[in-house]
Amino acid sequence: MTFSATDPSGGAGMQADLLTIASMGCHPLSVVTAVTVQDTSGVDDILPIDPEWVVDQARANAGGRAGIAFKIGCWAAWRTSRRSRRYWLIIRYPLILDPVLASGRGDELANEDMLDAMRELLIPQTTIITRTAWKRAGWR
């Protein structure tokens, strides 16, 4: 199950995640976290999805399914929701963390609150974290 923002250019985000997951022979499940206005060079605007909707999408998708892993990309919508923060503390699936912290041209998509929440809530539960994400966050 991928948690991503849309990318109308198809080069990243939800569209790229779905293609990648399907190419690995898996059935992709999706949770939209934000809608973007972007092209292949960068993000012009981002509209986070209500955090309650993000949680509800995940619960509906995960309900009763076996063999699920979570892949987290852009998580802009999660920063303000206490409910979603509680939900992520009880993840029972393998977690792949590839957070989108900036666009390809350097547009910042994360703030300190998001990074703090990631450090506190997600990293302790992460099975795999991408090297690029690790370096962008300034972790050693």
Image (cartoon, rainbow, N blue to C red):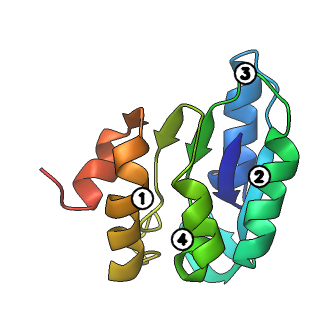
| Amino acid identity at mark 1 | Leu
Q: Mark 3 belongs to which amino acid?
A: Ser
Give the amino acid at mark 2: Ala
Q: Nearer the viewer, residue 135 or 89?
A: 89
Of helix, strand and loop, which one carries label 2?
helix
Q: CA distance from mark 3 to mark 2?
A: 22 Å
Image marks 3 and 2: residues in contact by CB distance under 8 Å: no
Q: Earlier in the sequence, mark 3 or mark 2?
A: 3
x, y percent for residue 9 = 72, 59
Where disc 3 sits, the SS reads helix
Is residue 38 depicted above or below 121 in this figure?
below
Circle 1: element type: helix
Residue placed under numbered mark 3 in the picture: 23
Q: Is residue 62 above or below residue 79?
A: above
Location of residue 5 (image quadrant) = bottom right
N-terminal of the pair, mark 4 or mark 2, is 4
Residue, disc 1 = 121
